[in-house]
Amino acid sequence: MDVIRQKRAPVYEALEKFRRQRVVPFDVPGHKRGRGNAELVSFLGERCVGIDVNSMKPLDNLCHPVSVIKEAEELTADAFGASHAFLMVNGTTSAVQAMVLSNVKAGEKIIMPRNVHKSAINALILCGAVPVYIDPKVDTKLGIPLGMEIADVKRAVEENPDAKAILINNPSYYGICSDLRAIVKLAHENGMKALVDEAHGTHLYFGPNLPVNAMTAGADMAAISMHKSGGSLTQSSILLCGPGANVGYISRIVNLTQTTSASYLLLASLDISRRNLALNGHDSFEKVTAMAQYARSEINEIGGYYAYGNELINGGSIYDFDETKLVVNTRSVGLTGIEVYDLLRDEYDIQMEFGDLSNVMAYISIGDRLQDIERLAGALADIKRIYAKPEYSFFSAEYISPIVKATPQEAFYAEKESLPIESTIGRISAESVMCYPPGIPILSPGEVITKEILDYIKTAMEKGCSMQGPESEDISELFVLK
């Protein structure tokens, strides 16, 4: 990495120069640097609204960058150890979809864990590729899916030698990492591309003693959520490419779905955040890791809760663990994660990242403070004292193995009918159903609806998980294939 060059932030610098010029705007956006919307200026500030501008020669164009955006992408590639980087303003969803769409076409196979983010499933709906699912192992005590075991990946490759790519989640929302180097090597030995959904792994490129990142492991492409742990604005992300990538073709694919009206607020935030990580990321994420480790020790001293860490590593389904992830299992205090999530928000003004049936998660990153960690630990101790119940059994995992009868695209576009959800057992779903976050489908298009799946959905709804996917707002009905 060229540290001298990394001090530049070309998009930000160009915007600052533009702002000082006081150019008369006869272009979009129609608020005209805020003059047409005083309330917006009052809400966001004159400085912010004043650089909410359209593409123009001095500011380049994200659809075909030739100047400052191109330079920003080159600096991003250098910072992340990639051959090329695309700045993305439609979120990591569009980065994941660009990875899939640029590597598989209709009828071609892609190997992936079933517990992928909905963006990957939706990419299959768009392109018509055929998923070869690997069912992840499950920790039934913690209620979480684990990583991809290399033996399972080998079996999928041997049974599907015509597959074009392998998609890997790394790290998972819960911090679980697969043997990324081995999977990438296996993919390449069999003529397949290795694609990594690295939405939760921006920090792996900068922090010390963290699991290996996708580019170091030799992956062909990786989707990075800079707005998660990297400090940029929500919806801003990065798509990284390895040395063998056909950048021109990928650019065409990116432009199929990414907006032609890119937000310069998002682009500048990516530019500034990349510079910050390149110059200060090592020290920042060393502190983040230390804070997460401190939080684990404080929470585990309370008793009942289990904030897990790298003691889970088993060399297989948990090949490594991302210690910046603070996930707390709540089962032994007799509360679901979503119940603890709601109590923290409603009673203690603490906003967690998500709660599921077994765990609650705090996303620790560069903006957190030690006093916030101590406040969280204190609130959890209080919740245990006031609200704890006897431990009881409920669903043992955040994953149910599917019975796949059609591809996502076939099911999504098939003739279908809407039925009361309790009448759909045995039918093939035309919709997805998921808790969000984390956005991993409990049910995807093309899968058989079982009693176990419906019981899981019912329990998740009763406990207060935020559900989405079907057309039915209250999830009382599902579309199924006729």
Image: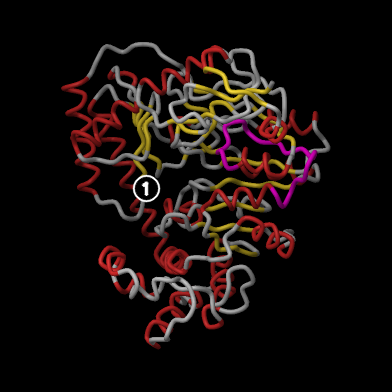
Q: Is residue 109 magenta?
A: yes
Where's residue 278, x and y in %? 46, 66
Q: Nearer the viewer, residue 181 or 89?
A: 89
On the image, numbered disc 1 is attached to which residue?
Answer: 289
Q: Is residue 377 left or right of residue 113?
A: left
Q: Nearer the viewer, residue 378 or 49?
A: 49
Residue 309 lies in quadrant:
top left
The relative height of residue 450 versus residue 51 in the rendered view (above or below) is above
Q: Secondary structure at mark 1?
A: helix
- What stretch of residues is rendered in magenta? 101-119
The structure residue drawn at horizontal position 28% and vertical position 28%, both measured from the top left corner, is 340
Residue 118 lies in quadrant:
top right
The relative height of residue 62 versus residue 191 in the rendered view (above or below) is below
Q: Nearer the viewer, residue 147 or 362?
A: 362
| Circle 1: residue type | Thr
Where's residue 458, x and y in %? 44, 18
- Taking the view exactly as shown, the residue that stands out farthest to the bottom is 21
- Circle 1 packing at 10 Å, graded few (<14), some (14-19), many (20+), is many
The structure residue drawn at horizontal position 33% and vertical position 75%, both measured from the top left corner, is 35
Where's residue 189, x and y in %? 79, 44
Q: Is residue 438 left or right of residue 100?
A: left
The N terminus lies in which quarter of the figure? bottom right
The C terminus lies in which quarter of the figure? top right
